[in-house]
Image (cartoon, helix red, strand yellow):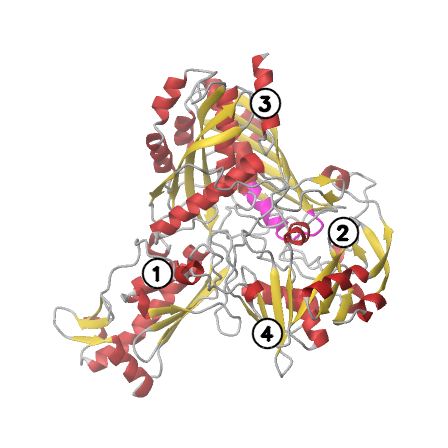
Amino acid sequence: MAIYESPVGASVGKIDGKEKVLGKAKYIADLVRPGMLHAAILASPHAHARILGYDTAAALRLPGVHAVLTGDDFGDGLMGPFFKDEGPIAKGKVRFLGEPVAVVAAEDEKTARAAAQLIGVEYEELPAVLTPEAALAEDAPLVHEDFASYFKVFEPQWQGNMCNYAEIAEGDIERGFAESDVIVEGEFETQPQYHLSIEPCGALAELDDSGRVHLWSANQSVFRVQANVCEALGLPMSKLRSMTPRVGAGFGNKMEAHVQPVTVALALKTGRPVKLILSREEDMEMVRARHPSKMRMRTGIKRDGTFVARELEVLLDGGAYADDSPGVLGIICLKACGPYKFPNARAHGRLVYTNKLRFGAFRGFGNPQVSFASESQIDEVAAEIGMDPIDIRIKNAVCAGERWFGGQVVDSSGLVECLERVRTDSDWDKRRAAKGGKPKNNGTTPGTRRALGVASAGHISGLLATGAIVRMLEDGSFVLNTGATDIGQGSDTVLTQICAETLKVPMDRIVYASPDTDAAPYNWGTTASRVTYTTGRAVVGAANDVVRQIMVHAAVMLETSEDELELREGGVIGVKGANKEMPFVAIAARAHWGAGGPIVGSHSLVYDKATFDHDRATVIGIPFENIGAYTFSANVVEVEIDETTGKTDVTRAWYAVDVGRAINPRLVEGQVEGGFAQGLGLALYEELVWDGPRLVNPSLMDYKAPTTLEVTYDIHSSIVEHPEPDGPYGAKGVGEITLVGVPSAVANAIADAVGVRLRKLPLIPESVLKALLEEDR
């Protein structure tokens, strides 16, 4: 038996690392089934139009084509996480340019794509609303005429194309501003961002001999896939088995349905396996993206730096379908004060349908947008009173035992330590003192400017239901099954570490089972930074259930009471104070062959800590009541700006993150580096651009994202550990918090360098150059 070393806190390699390094990992595009057909999609050329009819004859005549499905072939089943407003394919009318209107199954992909282009669709084009402002106009055409009849998981505040109004308020906002010595107000705007997962969306569906569907797909939750497909197609959930191969990242775009429903429909129609993989262009045009937003924010403070009042108004473009948008609006409102104490605050916003690609969950879930406004304005008020930006954040930071906006008690907070870490690591005080006011030609080369910027953030980690099962095998090793999908972040490894720590066995004595709705306990999804914290709690519970059962057998075998036993390292039960032990293998043999039956431990939970204190806060139109524990971060960036072109380069970065307890420090550092790069894209480079209803840059030739050419420097990461009381070994989430504050820190650095505040993302060279020219006037 391997020597036991505590795995929690150890930077062990990913359990799937070898297969990925060797190129042996199987993704959805790698899967093949006997007799498999290939599918392709015909997309709408209009943003808003009624579908009057179809002509599929030419497509069906093409040799190799086995099926063509249109909206006429689907029932009225609708899906959606908050509002059931979306079918598996356009039916009756299309609501955005690029929406699927027909699908084809053929012997090969080339034939399927050729057949799709042979399908004729007759449209009656309708006026389109392409901005939230246009959609809110009194005479605007409705994107969803039947919204009143849709099933909704909460009661929204809606009218016309506004599908929800949300509000959170505490204290007396008007009195707060009246008592403030300094008030800063501004409008901010953020852009739509593409998820840019390495792997585009795809699915493969196959029927077994009983007619039951087996579905593999690139997803973030096999259970959400199962629910969405069955709702959309009118199938009992027992008739569909949802599974996942390896997933090439998600970031939110694979949480809800994409091509799974139409792929299953084609398999049911043809009776043969069908695979559908989107091209990169289709993935950009058809799936989902980060919400663009417009925000108006006001902040009031005292001259000593005490925060007094904060107000946020947000207008959120939801696109053609609600998807996760109601939740995103709720999070934006919840994060309006940032990780700070404002005794008087109000956040309110409108979510609006438009005839654009749906906008949905994306790493940070609305927090990067509102943090851009919040953290920018904190630097502005600090400048007004001549206070250091880090000092003003520390003075107002939410600490353990204090309340988040809305009323939730924060059980652990390492925010102050994060800010102190980045201050020290970046040599903040010395660098800012050396800069000495508005700099010119102070970069590393002539004609450049260099400055530092800081931002901090808080984000949730938790939400909804999860479960875990731990089975003891005959030789005393174990199978861990959680239903959580590893999308590249390493959750399979982290959950195995948690299980091994609880059982006190080496990690190689535990195998992690692939997510499968037939065998796995329910898990809502790999989203909301929840897997380590929420599913990790279930793993601890299931493993402890196994330990409890092991003790029952060991007590009989060692002829003592359970109270006299202890779990020892390496897979043995021992008698306290004595050299008497019983190995797991012997206990497993007794359970399997002698008495009691095989040992299986399980644990399930729903996160139920209240997000709001309704006695102190007004809450309207927020679709959740139990959102999760809080994790915190602070980051400092150094930027260098070319005075001739306005081009901004980040030259150094320092990031501190409070994860409660780092189960695997190396994976935490990986999350910091990956989140930082993605946040840098939001700050400086990435933007989906429309010309009227048409997306004009749906390719990596035209969509700019940061690469190793842009991130050429070390990101100095610092792990802060303030254990969460109910987290697994104190752990909290880390997946999203590492992105949230990056655009804000970059914006603050640019403002410090050029002396002008930019309030619209991305911070492209043209905008920076314009600010430089204005500052020089």
Q: Quadrant of residue 531?
A: bottom left
Residue 709: x percent and y percent? Answer: 49, 38
Q: CA distance from mark 1 to mark 4?
A: 36 Å
Q: Amino acid at mark 4?
A: Arg
Near mark 4 (Cα within 10 A), the count class, few <14, some 14-19 or many ≥20, is few
Label drawn at residue 33: 4
Q: Quadrant of the N terminus?
A: bottom left
Q: Which residue is mark 3?
A: 769
Name above or below for residue 344 compared with residue 600: above
Q: Amino acid at mark 1?
A: Ile
- Direction from residue 40 to residue 628 in the image, left or right: left
Q: CA distance from mark 3 to mark 4?
A: 55 Å
* Label 4 element class: loop
Residues at marks 2 and 4, CA–CA distance in whole angstroms? 34 Å
On the rendered structure, is 397 left or right of 501?
A: right
- Position of residue 630 relative to residue 526, above or below, is above
Residue placed under numbered mark 2 in the picture: 95
Image x and y of residue 73, in percent = 78, 69
Question: Which residue corresponds to the image point at 47% horizontal and 17% vertical from the top-left?
Answer: 441
Please name whichever residue, 711 or 435, is drawn nearer the observer in this view of the structure.
711
> What is the x, y in percent for residue 200?
59, 56
Can you identify the residue that label 1 sits on?
Answer: 498
Q: Which residues are magenta?
A: 319-334
